[in-house]
Amino acid sequence: LHVLLNFRQNLTIKKDSLMYQMIEDSKNLNQEQMSNYFAESKALKLVHQAMAKKKLGKEVSEDSEQSSEIEESNLHFTVFIHKDNIIYELGRYTIMKILDGRSGGVINYGRCDSKFIDGAFKIIEKIFSNHSDKLMDFSLISVHVE
């Protein structure tokens, strides 16, 4: 979502879509208001839940028991971005915070003078070696911005 919102000028978004509605609803909000809007969005939570459970073949509704199960699940989404030779991790559900609960915001991992994929791999490898006793299931998106 962070990536799509930051590159929306390069996208064609259908006017009857949830994404279009979220962009319209949030376009005049400041950073804090926007954070709250997305953090409290029931529609966005349902999309996250549905995608997180898709591989398990379960339907998820807002009032279902699965909805509360997902709130305590190990299913997470995160995005790594390489910009100006710095690696950032975006997302409300960052890998780094799996054991501490869900967290918002951006994590700056610092300068990456090597290839982006090598730098991101080192970060991910360190995270997993620190938490190898925990089962983690996540989707990862990597974006290189020039």
Image: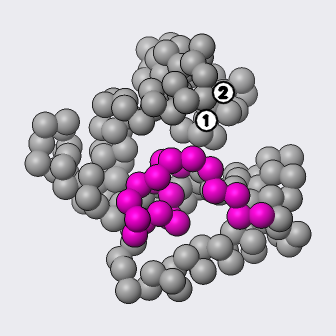
Residue 116 drawn above or below residue 91: below
Residue 15 drawn above or below residue 92: above
Where residue 56 sits in the image (x, y, percent)?
A: 25, 59
Q: Provide the residue designation for mark 1.
A: 4
- Tell me if residue 102 is in the magenta stretch: yes
Please report the residue visible at 40 percent of the width from the left and 65 percent of the height from the top: 100
What kind of residue is marked 1?
A: Leu
Q: Are marks 2 and 1 in contact (CB under 8 Å)?
A: yes
The magenta stretch is 91-110
Of the pair 56 and 41, the residue shown nearer to us? 41
Q: Is residue 14 visible?
A: no
Q: Is residue 4 visible?
A: yes
Please report the residue visible at 44 percent of the width from the left and 85 percent of the height from the top: 132
What kind of residue is marked 2?
A: Arg
Please tell me in which quadrant of the rendered image residue 12 appears: top right
**Callout 1: SS:** helix
Please tell me in which quadrant of the rendered image residue 118 appears: bottom right
Where residue 30 sits in the image (x, y, percent)?
A: 60, 22
Q: Provide the residue designation for mark 2.
A: 8
